[in-house]
Image: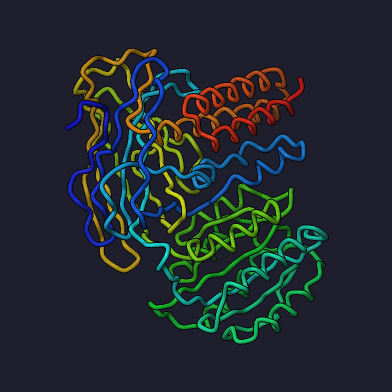
Amino acid sequence: MTRRFLVTWLTALMLAGCGGSMGGGDPVGGPGGGAPPVGGAPPAGDVGGTPGGAQDMALARRKIAVGIVPAPEDFVVEGLYSEHDLPLDGAPCEQVLCLRTATGIATALDTGRQEVFVQVGFSSNVDPTTFRRKPLDVALVIDRSGSMHGEPLEAVKEAARRLVAKLDENDTFSLVVFDDGALTLVEQTPVNDREALLRVIDTIQDAGSTCIECGLKAGFNQLATRGTDATRARRLFLFTDAMPNVGMTGDGEFMELLRSNSSEGRDTTVFGVNIAFSQSLVTAISAVRGANSFYLSNPERTRTIFDEDFDYLVTPIAYDLKMALTPAEGFEVEAVYGLPGVEPGASQAEMVVSTVFLSRRRGAILARLSRVEDIAPAQSVMTGNLSFQATGGGESRTTLTASYEGSEPLASTEAWYSQRSVRKAVALTNFVLGARSACELWMKGEKTAARQLADRTAALLQAEADRMDDAPLRTEAELAFKLASLMVP
């Protein structure tokens, strides 16, 4: 065992699982963590997986770009993780889903305390050069309400055209539009005449109020005409600004509609548009099993989603990933980040990720542990149990342990990272913590405090980007500085 802080996943996962890796690369120690080693590239075909839920933080980016201070909930930590490739070193992945881990000891921005962070990473052995998605039964459900007038509806129609272009004669398609009611323009039918479908899309015009569940019910009814078939996938694609003002308003009834259809194998992907987009509603929707969400912030984003990511975003590889954590004496699970539908920072010793999707990037979940004393060599930190179901059937189980394996006690002024990616994940997490808190202060009218916190968040992120020489992290630092510049006291 290497003498460093690590989380060791014991026993190889069976079926869709992969034995957890020890994490490669030398640990990064010393004040500030020093300069981290550059992790090796993953083996060919070792693509990624991301938890369901929000797959981007594009709404916050768009608001900042146009000079608007975002709402705190617009900073979606699982979405931010999904935008970045966070690969963890380890043995080549030999299964459809492999879980790898890395750990770090660093200062949390919100508390100022040195805490323990454990990254769980997702990878897969699927070869992108040979991968083919399952045939799809698609229900396309488009919001044409008055709030979609102009650019939002045109953006949706362009996205719908790109979606149709990804389908072939093995797929089926239906088209529903909704305002204060729903209208089925195309009943579920094989995709034999794309040009005819495109002509129907071109006819859509805005009108009326927004009854999202009206569109969902009509779309799910179309999918229900297709019987359950393990060789096919059934998915409803909802395009909306998520601003309902007609129909069900209670979360319970609305979410039950999604959950009941998910249990019947009819899954949901939400595409959001419009600067007035309701991030909180879509965050809840996309936390349902088999669901995910994206925000179409600009034409380039739309092109990337449909031309590069489409086959992956409709391909779940695991369900019901359960993690039960038992902290060692003197430690507590203080927060978990990256769980779809869970408020960042919620303390959870038992966690469930409803769905893991195939992805071009390696996603992450980050657990954070607080402690009451300095960490000593061979310090036990945590044990836990993990299980999940492969989409192909069967359940995998494994056990995890965590301990500090350094040769010297770690002082509270020092940072330590077992791998490059966990350092980046911690930096991204601190960005969300700082940005959310700054926006909360701004909304309360505490503008000077908001600006000070936003400046500090941006400076810390820039420092980490420079230490890691990480271009994507520098882009996030630029975003953080732009946010701070909007907060004029």
Point out residue 418 in the picture as x, y percentages from the top left corner: 32, 30
The vertical placement of 330 against 131, above or below, is above
Q: Is residue 487 left or right of residue 146?
A: left
Quarter location, residue 449 = top right
Q: Nearer the viewer, residue 146 or 377?
A: 377
Point out residue 290 in the picture as x, y percentages from the top left corner: 46, 62
Instruction: For the N terminus, give its image quadrant.
Output: top left
Q: Residue at x 65, y 41 (%)?
A: 60
Q: Residue at x 22, y 58 (%)?
A: 14
The vertical placement of 280 against 141, above or below, is above
Quarter location, residue 476 = top right
Point out residue 221 in the picture as x, y percentages from the top left corner: 57, 78
Instruction: For the C terminus, give its image quadrant.
Output: top right
Q: Nearer the viewer, residue 454 or 462?
A: 462
Quarter location, residue 381 = top left
Q: Residue at x 79, y 76 (%)?
A: 203
Q: Is residue 152 left or right of residue 50?
A: right
The vertical placement of 254 against 462, above or below, is below
Q: How many marks?
A: 0
Q: Residue at x 23, y 21 (%)?
A: 406
Q: Is residue 366 left or right of residue 217?
A: left
Point out residue 331 in the picture as x, y percentages from the top left corner: 30, 25
The vertical placement of 267 against 438, above or below, is below
